[in-house]
Image (cartoon, rainbow, N blue to C red):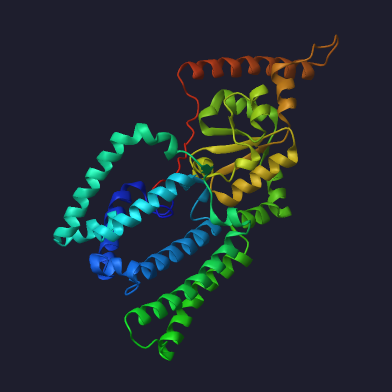
Amino acid sequence: MGPLVPSIISNEFDLIIALILGFGFGFILEQSGFSSSKKLVGLFYGYNFVVIKVFMTAGLTAMIGVLAFSHFGLLDISIVYINPTFLKSAIIGGLIMGVGFIIGGFCPGTSVCASAIGKWDGMVFILGSVFGIYFFMEIYPLISDMYFDGAMGALTMPQILGISEVSFALIMSAMTAGIFVMVSFIQSRVNKIPFELPKKKVVRMSILAIVPILIIAVTGFMPNRLERIEAKANDPENLKAAELKALDSDKLAIEIVNNYYNWNIIDVRSPEEYKSWHLPLSINIPLDSILNREWETYFKQDFKKNIYYSDDIDQTKKAFALAEVIGKADNYILNSTSKEFRTMFFEPHTLQAGASKETVKYYNFREETGKQMNDLKKSLERFHSAPKIKKMRKVQGGCA
C-alpha cells in the first residue's frame, strides 16, 4: 500500500485500504467495459480500443505517481520489487496469453470482473485458467531451463534507453497522446465512421494533459527529498548546533555504565571500522546509510537520546545535522573520536612515577569504568539485548 502504509497510515489499516482499493478497481474495470469480452477483443480486430486507452492511462498515471512520490520522499523506490526479465519465456508466454485473450475474450483480471457480475463466459474462463495453471505445474520440470533462459535481471526502460526517469516520463506522455489519436483514427476507419477531433474535446484533453506535464516538470527541476535534507544538514548553523550538544568521553562513559537504557549510541563509521572495534552497546549506522528507511525509527523516536561518534568530528557533526533534519530525537555528539575513547578506557597508558593526584584519580576512574562497561556489555549480550534492526523487504505485486 506504499506510500500510504506504513508511512502515512498505520499498518492496521493495510487490509482495509486494500479492500477499498479492490472495490474501486473492480468498479472502474466494469464501468470501462472490461467485463464485456466483445469490447475487450475489439482491440485485436480494430473496432474498439478501450483496453489500450484504459491501460495506457493507468500506466501513465502510475508512472507519474511513482516518480512524484519517490521524488518527494513518500515512496522508497529502492524497496519496490521489479520483476526480473527472462526474454525467451516472456515472448513465448506473451504469445500464449495473447492467443488465449483472443479465443477466450478475457485476461485473468477481467475474467474475474465479468464473473463478479454473473457472466458465465467469465466463469468458464476462470475455470480454464485453473486448468492452465495445473498443466503448467505438471510440465514445469520439463520447461524450467527454457523458463529461465535469457535472464537479463531487473531492468527498467530508462536503464535500457540510457536516459533519466523524467525524460522517459515525458516521452511516454507524448507517446500516449499520439497513440490515442492513432487508435481513434484506426477505430473510425474500421467502423466506417468519419474521423474527427472535436475542438472542445481537444481543448479539454489538452488542459488535462498539462497536469502530468507539470508534475513531471516539477520532479525534473525541483530538488528531491535527499537533496533538500543534505542542503539543510550542510547549513553551517545546523553543524554548529552540534557543538552545543557535545559530551566528552568521561561523561559518556558514566552514562553508559549508569543510564545505558536512556541512550542509543550510534557509530557512523563504515561497517568494517565498526567490526574492528566500537564503543560498548553501540550500533552501526554508517553516515551514508542514515537516510535509509530501516533506521528511521531511531531518529523519529523521542524516548531515548541519540549520541553519534566516529573517527572524524566533522563526520560526527554531519550525522547529528542529518538526524536533526529528518527526526525528532534528542541528539548529541561525542566530542572525541572512537580511537581516543578506546585509549582512555580500554588501553590506559602506564602511570609515570610521581604523577599528580588529579592524574591518578582520572586514571583509576577510567580503568574502573572501562571494566564496568565490559562487564555490562557481557551481561547484556547474555540476555540477547542487541538492538533489533527493522528489515526492509521488496514490495511485490502486479496484475497477471
Residue found at x 40% / y 77%: 186
Instruction: Please indicate whether residue 394 sits to the left or right of residue 110 in the image.
Output: right
- Which residue extends farthest bottom? 199
Residue found at x 71% / y 49%: 239
Instruction: Please indicate whether residue 250 sits to the left or right of residue 325 in the image.
Output: right
Quarter of the image for residue 61 reads bottom left
**Which residue is more in the foreground, 135 or 291?**
135
**Which residue is more in the foreground, 398 or 177?**
177
**Which residue is more in the foreground, 135 or 380?**
135
Instruction: Please indicate whether residue 131 sits to the left or right of residue 267 in the image.
Output: left
Quarter of the image for residue 249 reads top right
Residue found at x 19% / y 49%: 127
Q: Position of residue 395 (x, y in %)?
A: 43, 46
Q: Position of residue 29 (x, y in %)?
A: 28, 65
- Is residue 46 visible to the viewer in this orientation of the structure? yes
Q: Is residue 115 above or below residue 15?
A: below
Q: Is residue 399 above or below residue 357?
A: below
Q: Position of residue 32 (x, y in %)?
A: 29, 70
Q: Position of residue 400 (x, y in %)?
A: 34, 52
